[in-house]
Image: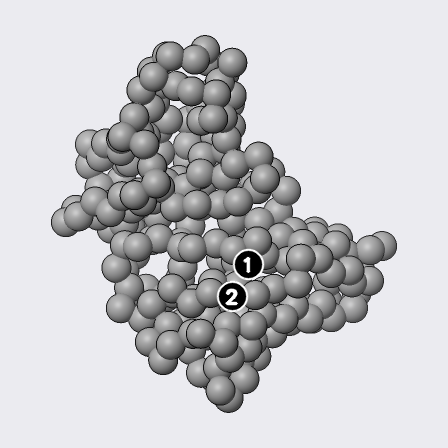
Amino acid sequence: DAKTTQPPSMDCAEGRAANLPCNHSTISGNEYVYWYRQIHSQGPQYIIHGLKNNETNEMASLIITEDRKSSTLILPHATLRDTAVYYCIGVPLRGGADGLTFGKGTHLIIQP
Amino acid sequence: DTAVSQTPKYLVTQMGNDKSIKCEQNLGHDTMYWYKQDSKKFLKIMFSYNNKELIINETVPNRFSPKSPDKAHLNLHINSLELGDSAVYFCASSQAASGRGEFFGPGTRLTVL
């Protein structure tokens, strides 16, 4: 799996867009970029994933650079409930049952 | 209508005991996993299992063993518990090629005294 690098922590004001960066310069062409988050004392939660194109769902948007060496997760209108640790993870296209390799993630704190 | 459930939520036990944590998923997924989150909050894969293969993280002691009575369950058995086994254990499930990622349970906090 691709190794990813994320800032250890970020702050964002409530109601603003939270932009979380991730560097994955070693990602290969056969790996998706997945984002998960873990709210305190809960299990991790899937947010979004992408391969080459930008993606959007009801939770967030994912912007992947053309060279696929980095991506940004965007929470368009952050709320206090978005305070969590956010993980960017490379996942092979082939699927299989390897499980996820979590890094240290970014602790996003939404300020009221 | 919980997707992935674990029991118990909390487990406190003495060193040397044998214990089990149960996991059930009602999503019809074909693959289930166990993860360990230590006191420093690092999440690590322990096992992944579908009806074809069991993949074991080589760092997991053989005191830990997963048991799958059926496709919807993957229980974690731990023998001769040690202090260092204290952690939060998460079960997860996924469906191959669905693209929806893994669904995690709420976790079981194990404390070994």
Chain on which label 2 sits = A
In this view, B82 is above or below A39 = above
Q: Which residue is mark 2?
A: A4
In the picture, the disc for residue A87 is 1
> In the image, residue B4 lies at what x, y percent?
40, 41
Q: Quadrant of residue B81?
A: top left
Question: Of label 1 and label 2, which has the lower sequence position?
Answer: 2
> In the image, residue B97 lies at what x, y percent?
29, 65
Question: Which residue is most to the left?
Answer: B52
For the residues labelled 1 and 2, the Cα–Cα distance comes to 9 Å
Instruction: Tally the marks.
Output: 2
Left or right of B24 in this view: A106: right
In this view, B76 is above or below A64 = above
> In the image, residue B3 lies at what x, y percent?
41, 44
Marks 1 and 2: which is nearer the front?
2
Q: Type of residue at label 2?
A: Thr
In this view, B28 is above or below B80 = below
Residue shown at the point (78%, 60%) measured from the top left: A11
The answer to whether residue A58 is visible is: no
Left or right of B81 in this view: A98: left
Closer to us: A20 or A14: A20
